[in-house]
Structure formats: structure tokens, C-alpha cells
Image (cartoon, rainbow, N blue to C red):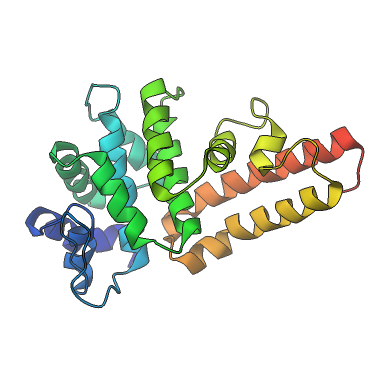
Amino acid sequence: MSIWGKLGGAAAGFLLGGGPIGALAGAFAGHVLFDRGGRTAGDGNAEPGIVFTIAIIALGAKMAKADGTVTDDEIEAFGRIFRVPPAEEANVRRIFNFARQDTAGYEIYAGQIARMFRGNPGMLEDVLDGLFEIARADGVLHPAELQFLERVAEIFGFSPDEFRRIRASHIGPDQADPYVILGVDRAASEDEIKRTYRLLVRENHPDSLMARGVPEEFLRLANEKLAAINGAYAKVMRERRLAS
């Protein structure tokens, strides 16, 4: 069953459960229930793909309020980006609208997600990647959206330099500094650049995302990010006249 087919039960749990993110995943998986403080009841074995998907939908809904206006455009953008089947659009819309209307602030949501993926920074970065794609769906990364993303990244435990690296991979290789995309200083040695590049490729390869629990429906993001990393590395190698 695709991740979208699994959201039906999770969506019902979202409406009936006690907490904004954990109750959603817990109601579906039958193992985890998070209250507003993020405490767990059960063994904590909620399916990572369900938690990941709901995290992006819920935080995407909160981000939709960042500029002060709330429309259905963000839901439609989400459906386009992640290719939600028509039969599952209602489940996505239900989760999106519940999160959008919930009085809990986005920082509570982000905090719960950070706790759920504690010790798994790769998955937290995957969530940020999804949010960046939603934010730039209209062709513009609005200042309020950028501020939202920066704060979420901080809650997730990413440093300002790490956030700049993640952001750079989403604004296009022609506009971004290739050294920022790779997360290295311009004075970095050839060995450091190559070592960092190999690490980024390994962490962002679709196989690595699947191993972390990212649903197959989201792997297109990995391919696009990997292309940005490869492009940045090639540009640095050309500038330095080095063999890749």
C-alpha cells in the first residue's frame, strides 16, 4: 500500500487523538500517543514513513499561515509536488486543515517532530527539504516563509551554517554559492571538499532516504537535491581546475 493509502487511518487519529503530530501517527500505528508535551505512551514504534508524511503536511499547513493569508493553494501545491493520487486528496486535505486550524503554534509541532526523530538528523533534514519545496512552489520564497523555516531548523537542532547549506540546495546552482551548498569554507582543502561531498552524496542518496524510512513518494526530492550537490561539486572542481 502506498503512503497515501495509509493516511486514511492516520487522518482519523488526527481528528480524534490528543496531540497534533504524535497522536496522528500513534492512532494509525497503534503504538504511540504523544500529548502536547511530547511524552510517549507505548513502545514508540510508529511507522517512520507515516510520521514523516504527517510532519510535512502539518508543518506545511502551519507555514501556509506564515504570510498572514490562508488559501487552498498550499494544499494544491503539496498535491502537485508529492503527486498525491486523487483518491487520497481528501485525507491530505483533512490533515492539512486540522493542523492549519489548530491553536497550537508551529513551534509545538516542530518540537514534537524533533523529539520523534531525535538521533536521526537525516530525517529532520528530509522534513526541511519537503517544506522548502512547498515554500517555493509559487516561485517565490517569501521572507515570512524563510523566517519560519529558519526557526524550524533551529528547533530541529541545525546550526545557522547547516541551515544555509540546506537552503542553498533549494534555490538553484546558478544562484547559490557552491561552497555553501557543500557546507565547506572557500579555503577548504581538496581532501576536505571531496570528503564532504562524498558524505553529502551518501546521506542524500535515495537509498539512504528509504533506509531512514522516507516513503518512496518523496524520493524525487532526494534526486533533485543530489543534482544540486553534484552541480555544486562540479563547479568547485572546475574553479579549482581539479579532477573530480
Q: Residue at x 32, y 54 (%)?
A: 113
- Indicate whether 119 appears above or below 62: below
Q: Is residue 154 visible?
A: yes
Could you tell me which residue is drawn at 79 percent across and 42 percent down? Answer: 188
Q: From the viewer's side, name the closer residue of 4 and 13.
A: 13
Q: Give the x, y percent position of residue 168.
A: 59, 34
Nearest to the observer: residue 168 or residue 150: 150
- In the displayed structure, does residue 185 sit left or right of residue 45? right
Report which quarter residue 28 is drawn in.
bottom left
Instruction: Give percent across and percent down for residue 217.
Output: 42, 55
**Residue located 28% across and 42% down the image:** 107
Whether residue 153 is situated above or below residue 67 in the rendered picture: below
| Residue under the image location 58 percent in, 49 percent down | 223
Residue 75 in sight in this render:
no
Q: Give the position of the N terminus as an image quadrant.
A: bottom left
> Left or right: where does residue 73 sit relative to residue 235?
left
- On the picture, is 91 further left or further right than 237? left
Q: Is residue 96 above or below residue 64?
A: below
Whole-percent x, y for residue 83 in the image: 38, 46
Residue 93 picture location, percent across and down: 20, 43
Along the horizontal axis of the image, is 171 left or right of 149? right
Tell which residue pokes out farthest to the left in this image: 16
Count of all numbered marks drawn on residues in the image: 0
